[in-house]
């Protein structure tokens, strides 16, 4: 249908924007509990013309032949097109997996518990034996009931990469994202090596003290982390009723009045089928942004809202005059980086005193705890990237479950279930975006602390600085934003330094 030329790009952008509007609105309505069914497959079908192999060829050609701004935009469009094309090839399978997962149940105490809800049960279960029992039942269900379709899903997706002329799925995404995954993995290997002792000593002591379990694969499991992270002992500082006011109050301090943003909608209404985790939907950037919350309280609920609030502010502050590619597409490490930046408040001792109202000692203890969780996550993602590079290297999937268990268990020193080897995987190497976002955040932190101080969140100038950055949407990559701030680009040493300093200086 599309044969090339300037006008066609204009039409392609317009239709893509319409597609994303419909799709994100559908996600919003479904996950906020206002619409039972989720008809994303039908919407993709309606816009099928956008995601053809002809268009991939056309956009790839445009990308290769263009330079400067043109190349930047065509790179984003090509990635959007390829991802949409791959999604179309597996859409029935995706629907089936989601439906099966939604119906699946495990039996706990003679009661049938929905598989999805059992995760919340696990998070709140203080008894280790019972936690292991729930975990075993979940893993068994994944192996017997979900993995067959997941296997077919990844096999089909891998085949698409080869059909498009790439040697593997990782080669395809390295090309689309313009990120050298091997170099990133090498940086994360350095992070692992340099934090090994620190992790074993500090995280090990925390796990022993809070859960009474030694940190080693023969004693602890990944599911124990879920309970540790829930951290009920801090609930009194993270009340359900204060969740949204704390976010608004923090922003108000830096002169960001979210009420004056007529484009960010706070959906805080309680609905039966609303997602328990906060999320952000962006049907139209910047004029229609939803920040959806089902407040439940607890430290992880606060952290999730700060994260999603970061996305909402970023997209809600994006200049309406920017082209489609810069408002919706681009380098996702940027928006994730801004979201992680807001999360940093959970490790800021002064903020913990000012907002959740901790005293000095508790704030110090909590910041330390939160930093250790972050170290756990960074190590987990180092392992994830390493494993996903093996999973997606073009060789057969069969037999890779033991590689998953070995790599992930080794980085966290907690046993990971091999049954999760096809489920605990991000599409399109999103794990690399998260890693780059953590690095981006640690560099932005150095810049902001330097310029505005440790209590930057109380400075109007810090607010206007962030608004200025957000204004560019995702026009620039994470590397480019950092270069503009005087860094030589993304540098893992800042993340390593930030993690080790914050834990050592406790
Ligand atoms: Zn995010």
Image (cartoon, rainbow, N blue to C red):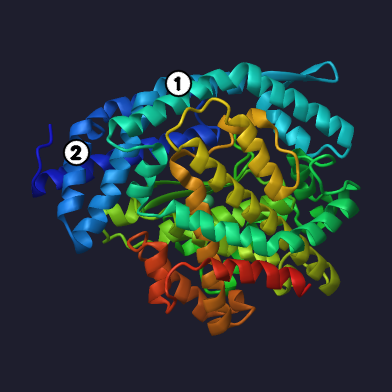
The tag earlier along the polypeptide, 1 or 2, is 2
What's the CA distance linking mark 1 and mark 2?
26 Å
**Around disc 1, counting alpha carbons within 10 Å, would you say few (fewer than 14), some (14 to 19), or many (20 or more)?**
some
Element carrying mark 2: helix
Q: Which mark is residue 113?
A: none
Compared to 161, does 454 lie above or below?
below
Q: How many marks?
A: 2
The residue that disc 2 covers is 57
Q: Are marks 1 and 2 in contact (CB under 8 Å)?
A: no
What residue is drawn where x is 42% and y is 57%? 315
Q: Is residue 231 visible?
A: yes
Secondary element at image label 1: helix
Locate residue 22, reporting x and y percent.
35, 36
Q: Quadrant of residue 480?
A: bottom left
User: Quick one: label 2, few (<14), some, or many (20+) residues within 10 Å?
Assistant: some
Q: Which of the 4 quarters of the picture holds residue 363? A: bottom right
In this rendering, would 434 be left or right of 377?
A: left
Q: Which marked residue is nearer to the observer: mark 1 or mark 2? A: 2
* Mark 2 Cβ inside 8 Å of ligand 1: no
Q: Nearer the viewer, residue 173 or 387?
A: 387
**Which of the image's four quarters has the N terminus?**
top left
Residue 70 image offset from top left, x and y in percent: 19, 58
The residue positioned 46% from the left and 57% from the top of the image is 183
Asked whether the viewer can see residue 348, the reply is: no
In the displayed structure, 399 sits above or below 485; it is above
Q: Image quarter for residue 101?
A: top right
Tell me which residue sits at (59%, 57%) in the image: 189
- Residue 93 shows which numbered tag? 1
Q: Nearer the viewer, residue 200 or 79?
A: 200
């Amino acid at each position: 249908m599309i044969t090339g030329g300037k006008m066609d790009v204009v039409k392609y952008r317009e239709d893509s924007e319409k597609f994303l509007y419909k799709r994100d609105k559908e996600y919003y309505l479904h996950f906020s509990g206002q619409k039972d069914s989720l008809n994303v497959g039908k919407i993709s079908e309606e816009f099928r013309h956008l995601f053809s192999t002809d268009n991939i060829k056309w956009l790839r050609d445009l990308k290769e032949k263009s330079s400067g701004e043109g190349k930047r935009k065509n790179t984003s469009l090509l990635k959007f097109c390829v991802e949409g094309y791959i999604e179309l090839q597996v859409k029935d399978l995706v629907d089936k997996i989601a439906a099966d997962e939604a119906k699946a149940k495990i039996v706990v105490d003679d009661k049938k518990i929905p598989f999805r809800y059992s995760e919340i049960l696990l998070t709140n279960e203080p008894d280790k034996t019972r936690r292991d029992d729930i975990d075993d039942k979940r893993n068994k269900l994944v192996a017997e009931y979900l993995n067959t379709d997941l296997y077919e899903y990844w096999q089909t997706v891998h085949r698409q990469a080869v059909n498009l002329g790439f040697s593997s799925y990782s080669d395809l995404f390295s090309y689309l994202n313009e990120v050298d995954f091997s170099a990133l993995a090498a940086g994360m290997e350095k992070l692992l090596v340099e934090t090994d002792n620190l992790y074993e000593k500090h995280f090990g002591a925390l796990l022993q003290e809070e859960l009474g379990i030694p940190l080693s694969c023969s004693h602890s499991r990944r599911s124990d982390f879920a309970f540790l992270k829930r951290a009920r002992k801090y609930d009194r500082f993270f009340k359900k009723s204060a969740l949204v006011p704390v976010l608004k109050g923090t922003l108000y301090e830096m002169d960001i009045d979210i009420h004056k943003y007529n484009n960010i909608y706070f959906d805080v209404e309680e609905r039966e089928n609303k997602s328990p985790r906060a999320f952000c939907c962006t049907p139209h950037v910047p004029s229609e942004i939803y920040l959806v919350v089902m407040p439940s309280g607890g430290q992880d609920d606060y952290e999730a809202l700060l994260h999603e609030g970061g996305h909402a502010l970023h997209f809600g502050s994006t200049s309406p005059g920017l082209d489609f590619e810069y408002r919706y597409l681009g380098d996702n490490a940027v928006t994730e980086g801004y979201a992680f930046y807001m999360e940093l408040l959970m490790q800021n001792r002064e903020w913990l005193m000012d907002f959740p109202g901790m005293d000095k000692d508790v704030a110090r203890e909590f910041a330390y705890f939160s930093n250790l969780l972050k170290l756990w996550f960074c190590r987990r993602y180092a392992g994830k990237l390493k494993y996903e590079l093996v999973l997606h290297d073009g060789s057969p999937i069969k037999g890779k479950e033991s590689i998953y268990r070995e790599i992930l268990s080794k980085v966290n020193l907690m046993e990971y279930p091999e049954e999760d080897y096809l489920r605990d995987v991000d599409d399109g190497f999103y794990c690399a975006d998260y890693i780059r976002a953590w690095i981006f955040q640690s560099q932005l932190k150095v810049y902001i602390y330097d310029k505005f101080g440790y209590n930057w969140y109380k400075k109007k100038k810090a607010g206007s600085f962030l608004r200025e950055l957000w204004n560019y949407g995702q026009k620039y990559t994470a590397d480019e934003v950092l270069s503009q701030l005087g860094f030589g680009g993304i540098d893992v040493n800042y993340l390593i330094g930030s993690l080790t300093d914050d834990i050592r200086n406790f």
